[in-house]
Every structure is written in C-alpha cells, then in structure tokens.
Image (cartoon, rainbow, N blue to C red):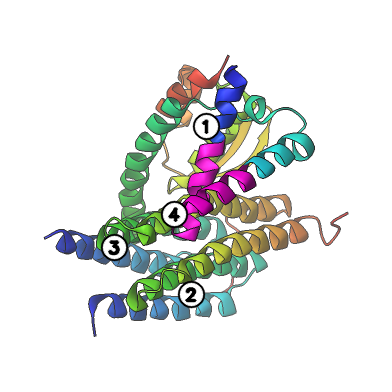
C-alpha cells in the first residue's frame, strides 16, 4: 500500500467513528454537526482518490459535493430554526 | 473609466476559473470563457444585485491579501490551543456581547466569518455593530478589548475598508 | 525531498483530525463540541490540502485543489454558524444536562 492509500483508509475510519456520533447524538444539532464533519472528510477522500488514480476530472465531483453539502446543511439548520415554517 | 477597468479585472478572474476547470489553454477555450464570463457579469449586475457589483463588494486586493496572511497564522496558533483544550478536557463555555469598531457592513461580515474560521470562537448573531460570540470561558482576546475600547488586531486590518 | 515535506504535512493533518474526532466524543455539551470539533476540521483541511498541492506539483490538478480549498474555506464557517445559530435561537442553553 502506498502512502496515499493508507491516508484514504485512515480517513474512512474517521468517517465511521463520526457516524457513531451521528447515531448516538442526543440532540438534532449534534447530528447536523456530524453531517457537516463527514461532508468535509468526503471532499478530502475524493481529492485523494483523484490523485491516486490520476484522473483529475474527479476534482469536479469534489467541487460539486462541497457546494451541495453547504446548501444542505444551511437548509436543514434554517428548517429547524424556523420550526418548519420556511415561507 | 475606473468602472471599466474593474469590470475587466473581474472578467479576467472569471476566465481564469473557466480555464482551470476545463484544463486547457486553447484559443477557442479562452474565447468561450470570455463570452460566458461577460454574460455572467452582465446578468449579475443587471438582475441579481440592487447596486453595482463594485459598490457592493468593494475590497482592496492588498487589504484582502494581508488579511489572509494574518488569518493563516492565527488559525494555526489557536488550533494548537484547541488541542490543549481537548487533552485537558476543559469544556466550560460562555457567550460574549461585543461591539466592533468597524462601520462598513462588508467589513463586519468579513470579521464575523474570520471569528468563526479560527478555532475556539463561533459567531452566533449580528445586529448592527453588536456581535454575539460563543467562546471558551478563559478566552481573553475579546473581553479585554471591550473594556479598553481599542480595536483588536483583526479589526485594525479591516478598518481600512471603511470610507 | 519536497515529497517528504508533503508527507509530513499530511501526517500532521491526520493527527489534527484524530484529535477532532476524540474531542467529538470527549466533551459532554453541544456548544463545546461545536467549538472544538468543527474548527479542528478547518486546521486539518487546510494542512492536508497544502500537502496535496505540494505533492501534485505545478499542474492543473494543483490549481483545482486550490479552488476547492478556497470554496471550503469560505463556506465551512457559514455552515458552522448556521448550526450554532439554529441551536441558539431554538433555546438550547449552556450547561444543559446531556444524556449520552
């Protein structure tokens, strides 16, 4: 295994650990925080995968994932803050 | 005349983004990029913003560069303090009310973003010049300044955005 | 030689992220968790991306990584702020007893 593949494996272990926090999390905001953390880690793993397989168009997927993760987090946070009234 | 130069600078930045995303430097790509950047710039100015692009986002590039350098070192400095917090398991927090000495709206937004970006402090709310900051109980850098009425080093750099 | 520097940076970033995950489990209150864990993410993300930029040299891939880093650096504080503000406005108070 090369160095980058080991890094990818360790980040995958982190994602599983944060997922336990998401499942345990007492409040809804803990789960949201875990979701945000996982989204940042997935961006890192996509960039690592693009470097390992040497296909630089995979970076575009990371760019789109960053935008979509941001919009999703903000939308759910506002949805809870307004108690479901988004008008 | 100044407006035209500003628009041209933005056009070149957008074309640079297009070329990076397409990974080529061919002449046809540059022409297509220039066309799409001018269309994007025109529609943003015409329909999405109430004022002009330049009057809404007037940021001097020199100020932005100095601010980014300062922020970079600040992030790492408070990152190491955050590690000490984790190892010692200190988890008492408090909410600070803080009034900035910046007057421009964009400057206050940049300051709030920077406060959230450095580990250890999160901005909760903004009402005019009043900021609500969530921080650890032994965070000193904002309460000391609020008593002495002198700007923190963050704001000294951003103050030059005021007009 | 320059590869060694990149490997060192990536390793430091992995240590930072490990501490962030530990902090996520060690603190009992939501507010202290959001102060520590989401923000350690910023340091880890910046470090690992600088390492990967050095590793891939001067190419289009490096510039794309720079674009992604810029985007995440702008949007990550905004989403953290949205979560914290949502908890604050919904009446979550400090030192509430959280069951685990």
| SS of the residue under disc 3 | helix
CA gap between label 3 and label 4 equals 15 Å
Tag 2 and tag 3, C-beta contact below 8 Å: no
Quadrant location of the N terminus of chain A in the rendered image: bottom left
Q: Which residues are magenta?
A: B11-37
Q: Chain of mark 3?
A: C
Name the residue furthest top.
B163
Name the residue furthest right.
A87
CA gap between label 3 and label 1 equals 29 Å
CA gap between label 2 and label 3 equals 29 Å
Tag 3 and tag 4, C-beta contact below 8 Å: no
Dot 2 and dot 4 within a common chain: no
Q: Chain of mark 4?
A: C
| Disc 3: which residue | C56
| Rendered view: B113 above or below B21 | above
| SS of the residue under disc 4 | helix
Return the mark for residue A18.
Answer: 2
């Amino acid at each position: 295994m090369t160095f980058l593949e080991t890094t990818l494996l360790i980040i995958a272990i982190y994602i599983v650990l944060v997922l336990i926090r998401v499942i345990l999390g007492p409040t809804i905001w803990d789960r949201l925080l875990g979701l945000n953390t996982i989204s940042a880690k997935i961006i890192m793993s996509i960039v690592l995968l693009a470097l390992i397989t040497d296909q630089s168009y995979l970076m575009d997927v990371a760019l789109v994932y960053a935008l979509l993760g941001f919009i999703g987090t903000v939308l759910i946070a506002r949805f809870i803050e307004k108690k479901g009234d988004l008008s | 005349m100044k407006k035209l130069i500003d628009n041209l600078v933005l056009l070149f930045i957008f074309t640079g983004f297009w070329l990076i995303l397409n990974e080529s430097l061919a002449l046809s790509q540059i022409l297509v990029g220039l066309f799409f950047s001018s269309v994007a710039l025109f529609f943003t100015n015409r329909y999405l913003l109430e004022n002009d692009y330049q009057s809404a986002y007037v940021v001097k590039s020199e100020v932005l560069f100095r601010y980014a350098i300062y922020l970079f070192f600040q992030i790492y400095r408070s990152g190491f303090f955050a590690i000490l917090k984790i190892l010692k398991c200190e988890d008492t927090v408090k909410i600070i009310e803080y009034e900035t000495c910046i007057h421009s709206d964009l400057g206050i937004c940049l300051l709030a973003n920077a406060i959230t970006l450095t580990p250890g402090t999160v901005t909760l709310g903004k009402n005019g010049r009043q900021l609500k900051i969530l921080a650890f109980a032994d965070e000193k850098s904002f309460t000391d300044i609020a008593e002495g009425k002198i700007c923190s080093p963050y704001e000294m750099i951003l103050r030059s955005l005021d007009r | 030689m320059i590869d060694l520097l990149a490997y060192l940076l990536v390793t430091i970033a992995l240590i930072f992220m490990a501490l962030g995950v530990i902090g996520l489990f060690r603190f009992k209150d939501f507010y202290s968790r959001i102060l520590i864990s989401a923000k350690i993410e910023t340091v880890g993300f910046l470090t690992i991306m600088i390492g990967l930029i050095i590793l891939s040299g001067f190419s289009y891939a490096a510039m794309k990584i720079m674009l992604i880093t810029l985007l995440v650096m702008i949007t990550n504080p905004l989403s953290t702020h949205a979560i914290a503000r949502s908890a604050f406005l919904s009446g979550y108070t400090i030192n509430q007893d959280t069951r685990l």
